[in-house]
Image: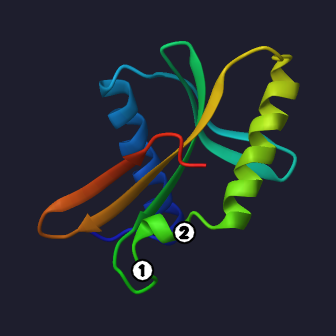
Amino acid sequence: MSYSGKNRGKLGEMIAAEYLQEKGFEILEKNYRFGKGEIDIVCRDNGVLVFVEVKSRFNLNYGEPEYAFTKNKQQQVRKMGAAYLYDKGLSECECRFDAIAILFDEDKGYRLNHIENAF
């Protein structure tokens, strides 16, 4: 399995979206862009608007993928969530921020960790 950096990220996002759909989430947007920012997945879970950040790793050279959800990344995703609400004219809706970490393994496929209300 050989993927370039950008394709690796897209593969992780595709797997995350499929996982969320299987869990009953309604996918509203993928790779939503506003200005210079992006949200990987915007979906709905039982009436709650969910902004999902996905991090994938193909090795542990930089640590577990969960460690990539830094304070700066969390702040950026929150800003993008606010931008999404503004852009779509939404004001009174319940929202949360989830994180999905995927670690690929050539022998076992991958391990997915879905962290609801991550930040």
Lateral position of residue 1 relative to residue 86, left or right: left
Residue position for label 2: 68
Q: Nearer the viewer, residue 74 or 88?
A: 74
Which residue does the image show at 81% across and 17% down from the upper left? 90
* Residue 72 on image: x %, y %: 73, 65
Residue 119 at what x, y percent from top left? 61, 49
Residue type, numbered disc 2: Ala
Q: Which mark is residue 52?
A: none
User: In the structure shown, which secondary structural element does the residue marked by tag 2 occupy?
Assistant: helix
Residue at point 45%, 64% (across, down): 66
The CA distance from mark 2 to mark 1 is 8 Å
Residue 58 coordinates in the image, percent (x, y): 35, 72
Q: Quadrant of residue 8?
A: bottom left
Q: For this rendering, which residue is in front, 101 or 109? A: 101
36 w.r.t. 67: above or below: above
- The relative height of residue 76 versus residue 3 in the rendered view (above or below) is above
**Horizontal arrangement in the rendering, residue 90 relative to residue 48 (left or right):** right
Find out whether the residues at labels 2 and 1 contact each other: C-beta distance under 8 Å.
yes
Residue 108 percent across, percent down from the top left: 13, 63
Instruction: Give above or below for 110 relative to 47.
Output: below
Tell me which numbered mark, 2 or 1, is placed earlier along the sequence: 1
- Tell me if 1 is positioned left or right of 78 in this view: left
Label 1 sits on residue: 63
Q: Using the rendered view, name the quadrant where residue 63 is placed.
A: bottom left
Quarter that holds the N terminus: bottom left
Q: Nearer the viewer, residue 69 or 1?
A: 69
Spot the residue most to the left. 107
Give the amino acid at mark 1: Gly
Crowd class of label 2 (few under 14; some 14 to 19; many from 20; radius 10 Å): some
Density class for disc 1 (Cα within 10 Å; few <14, some 14-19, many ≥20) is few
**Residue at screen point 48% across, 53% down:** 10
Q: Element type at marker 1?
A: loop
